[in-house]
Amino acid sequence: RKYMVNRQDADILAQYNLELRGFYNYYSIADNISYWRWKFNYFMKYSILKTLGRKHKRTVGQILEKYRDGTDVVIPYKDNKGNEKQRVWYNGGFRCKRFTDIYEDNHYDNIPNTMYLPAPTLVERLKERRCELCGKMGDLVMYHVRNINQLKADTRWNTMMIKRHRKTLAVCHDCDALIHKSYGN
C-alpha cells in the first residue's frame, strides 16, 4: 500500500490490526470463519511485509527477519512520553462466535411467532348471531351491495362497509328493515 509508506512502522501495523479485527468482528458469526480467516490473515500479513519492505527498500524476508519475535511480528516504538512499547501482529484467534457467546438473552434475531388469521367468512359471521350494526343477538340476514366503490359514507351502515372494505353486513331483522326503509324499498 503506497499511501502508507510515509507512516511510522508501528502505525502501519496498528492500521492492519484494526482492519483484521474489523474483518473478524464482522464475520465472526459465520460458520466457516476459521477457514477464511487464515487466508485473509496470510494476505494481510504478506501485505504489511510488502508495505514495510517498500518503505525500507528491503525484501519481505529481510523485513520478517528484522521484526520477527518467535512466531509473532513485533514492531517496537516510543510513545509520546518516550517510553519503549511494542505493537504485535494480531494473534487473538478467529473462533466462530455463536449467539449464546455474544448475547446472554439471544432473542434479538428470533423471528416473531406471528399468526395471520383470515377474515371471517359469511358463514362464520352468521353463526356468531351478533348484528354487526347494532350488536343485538338473534337471527341474522345478510345485507349486501353490488359495488363498494359506489357507496357514500352518508349512513352508518355504508360507512361501516367502506371502513371494513366489505360488500356485506350481517344484520338483525330490525336493522335490515331500517336499511331498506331508508332506501324506500
Image: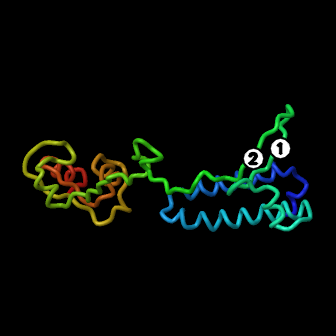
The type of residue carrying mark 2 is: Arg
Mark 1 or mark 2: whose residue is earlier in sequence: 1
Residue displayed at 15% across by 57% down: 124
**x 12%, y 51%: residue:** 128
Residue occupying image coordinates x 77% and y 65%: 47
Q: Is residue 98 left or right of residue 73?
A: left
Residue 145, position as x, y percentages in the image: 27, 62
Q: Residue furthest top?
A: 81
Q: CA distance from mark 1 to mark 2?
A: 8 Å
Asked whether 171 or 81 is in front, the reply is 81
Tell whether label 2 touches label 1 (CB within 8 Å): yes
**Side (left or right) of 169 relative to 42:** left
Please state the total of marks drawn on the protein image. Answer: 2
Q: Please state, as top left, top right, bottom left or bottom right, where the N terminus lies in the image.
A: bottom right
Amino acid bearing label 1: Tyr
**Label 2 packing within 10 angstroms: few (<14), some (14-19), many (20+):** some
